[in-house]
Image (cartoon, rainbow, N blue to C red):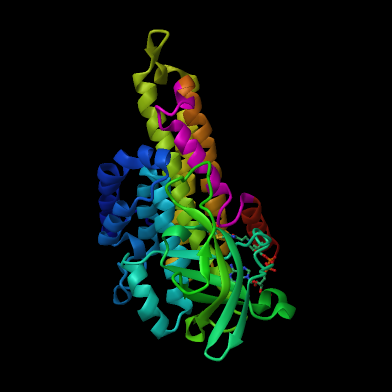
Amino acid sequence: MVFDLTDEQRMIQETARNFAQKEVLPVAAELDETGRFPAELVRQMAELGFMGVAVPEEYGGSGMDNVCYAIAMEEISRACASTGVIMSVNNSLVCDPILKFGSEETRKEFLAPLASGKNLGCFGLTEPGAGSDAGAQKTTAVRDGDCYVVNGTKNFITNAPNADVIVVFTMTDKAKAHKGITAFVADMKSKGISLGKPEKKMGIKASATASVIFEDVRVPAKNRLGGEGDGFKIAMNTLDGGRIGIAAQAIGIARASLEDALAYSKDRKQFGQPICDFQAIQWMLADIATEIDAARLLTWRAAWMKDRKMRHSKESAMAKLCASETAMRAGVKGIQIHGGYGYVREYPAERHFRDAKITEIYEGTSEIQRLVISSALLR
Ligand code: CAA
């Protein structure tokens, strides 16, 4: 067993860390406060090749592996979780299914601009009545000549207000239940697509989330991903990869809690000594650091398996479950170590806590991850 990173993995870690420290961290508090979309950071990430890390170079990506992707995601999210999720959705939930299930024409038309960061993508699976029960899709697509006519509403769609392209899941044959779901790529400027009001969120405020409404939207049949009825498996397969990205995001957030609490504990003096000299603080730091390492190992294992095209549903679910719950515990302890200063906006500890919570919810709640893991155990 080898734990060394390859030269390429080390290189992207260093590049992402430097970029995150110099460019992302200095604006993270302001992005959280204002909810402003970090267009300039997304443009810089595109230049660094972070918007399509594991997409082959011939389709505009960086041609690296999924471990590189997890490494870069962690570094960006360490500085700003909002910027992290913008990157994650584009990589895992949009580029990946187009690469795997799109025709050559679709890849050329949609993938290259997405992977190079010229365009931004979003993923339309969730509906008002289809959250954890992703198979309960109500959005319909009806074939009409060389198009499908799409009607329905997707909600909680990350990146939607800034996106150029959507991967959208629809019901083409209700009688077949989840086997009647079909996926498409659609241009967000298509006639009949409109957006709901951006959601006011607890955390990851600089990543915009909104409903996407489809009213008689004509989507060319050539934009279909896979065949009719393949949509549910495409969604699940895509989320297997997406959960690696969210696990890495959660590790970044947990690290932010740890590193900020560590620095504060060396600085803050009580009873005549830095609080890091107290065992009560040391144990909290030790627990967070241990959990972060465990979560990272699970995440890199899932990414490693994805690179080898091994089924990794269980491993991705374990990584996301462990990393997101680690981020929450790290957030709680990070605030506790800061005491009263952890509860006020002057320090970033409370931002990390607020940002951590969503990682236990999106791309499958912790309860759904436990379901995926236990189903694999019982299979
Ligand atoms: N890969 C390929 N196929 C898969 C699969 C996978 N990982 N998981 C299941 N399948 C297949 C099964 O083999 C089965 O195939 P057959 O019908 O041929 O037998 C079929 O899919 C149905 O499987 P299940 O019976 O297990 O399906 P289910 O209805 O019980 O649902 C679930 C399973 C795990 C609960 C699933 O619905 C799920 O993951 N729900 C959570 C949805 C989710 O994560 N949403 C996130 C939205 S996106 C988001 O959050 C983005 C963002 O904002 C950043």
Is residue 308 at least partly visible in the picture?
A: no
Is 87 drawn above or below residue 286 in the view shown?
A: below
The reply to whether the magenta stretch includes residue 275 is no
The image shows residue 238 at horizontal and vertical percentages of: 52, 67
In magenta segment, residue 351: yes
Residue that protrudes farthest toward the bottom in the picture = 145
Numbered range of the magenta stretch: 341-366
Question: Foreground residue, 262 or 354?
Answer: 354
Quadrant containing the C terminus is bottom right
Q: Total of numbered circles in the picture?
A: 0
Residue in the picture at 49% in, 47% down: 295
**Residue 263 x/y as whole percent:** 35, 27
Q: Residue furthest right?
A: 175
Q: Quadrant of ligand 1?
A: bottom right
Residue 170 against residue 281 in the figure, above or below: below
Q: Main secondary structure of the magenta part?
A: helix
Question: In the image, what residue occupies the spot 31% across and 45% down?
Answer: 24
Q: Extreme top residue here?
A: 272
Q: Quadrant of the N terminus?
A: bottom left
Q: Position of residue 315 (x, y in %)?
A: 54, 59
Q: Position of residue 129 (x, y in %)?
A: 68, 61
Residue under the point 51% across and 38% down: 354
Q: Nearer the viewer, residue 226 or 129?
A: 129
Asked where in the image residue 378 lies, by quadrant, the reply is bottom right
Q: Can you see residue 2?
A: yes
